[in-house]
Image (cartoon, rainbow, N blue to C red):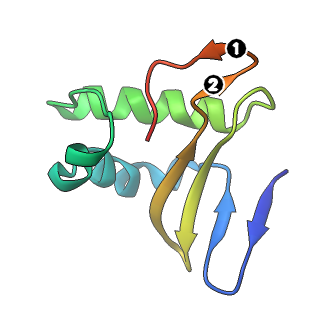
């Protein structure tokens, strides 16, 4: 599954160009109050997490998708468990 489109939203694999927008979401304090996110104290940690999610987004064994409204990334779908193997975090 490459892409799902509705009238308002698109679910798709992550792309390199999503990095700044996803890091903005991952480092957002309000989002951090609700979702289990690792501490992303610096740009290197945030970039490392983005690279990890980008790689997972391209794998059939995981369901990691960008949630977009138009060209703007507004969220992320991330599997919590596939085949009994829990992942380290979920957003």
Instruction: Return the x and y of residue 42 as percentages of the image width and height.
Output: 16, 31
Rendered-image quadrant of the C terminus: top left
User: Which residue position is annotated with label 2?
Assistant: 81
Question: Residue 84 — which label?
Answer: 1
Instruction: Return the x and y of residue 4 as percentages of the image width and height.
Output: 77, 65
As drawn, 29 above or below 46: below
Instruction: Return the x and y of residue 1 as percentages of the image width and height.
Output: 85, 50
In whole angstroms, how far apart are the C-alphas of marks 2 and 1?
6 Å
Residue at 26% x, 52% y: name it: 31
Seen from this angle, which residue lies furthest top?
A: 85
Residues at badges 2 and 1 in contact (C-beta under 8 Å)? Answer: yes
**Residue 3 location, quadrant:** bottom right
Mark 2 secondary-structure assignment: strand
- Relative to residue 13, is residue 27 drawn left or right? left
Most foreground residue, 68 or 15: 68
As drawn, 52 above or below 73: above
**Residue 36 location, quadrant:** top left
Instruction: Return the x and y of residue 40 as percentages of the image width and height.
Output: 22, 31
Most foreground residue, 53 or 47: 53
As drawn, 46 above or below 76: above
Mark 1 secondary-structure assignment: loop
Residue at 40% x, 29% y: name it: 49
- Relative to residue 52, is residue 5 drawn left or right? right
């Amino acid at each position: 599954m490459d892409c799902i489109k509705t009238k308002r939203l698109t679910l798709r694999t992550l792309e390199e160009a999503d990095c700044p927008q996803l890091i903005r979401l991952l480092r957002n304090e309000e989002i951090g109050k609700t979702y289990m996110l690792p501490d992303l104290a610096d740009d290197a940690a945030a970039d490392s997490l983005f690279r990890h999610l980008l790689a997972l987004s391209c794998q059939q064994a995981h369901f990691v998708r960008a949630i977009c409204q138009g060209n703007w990334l507004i969220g992320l779908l991330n599997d919590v468990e596939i085949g009994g193997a829990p992942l380290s975090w979920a957003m």
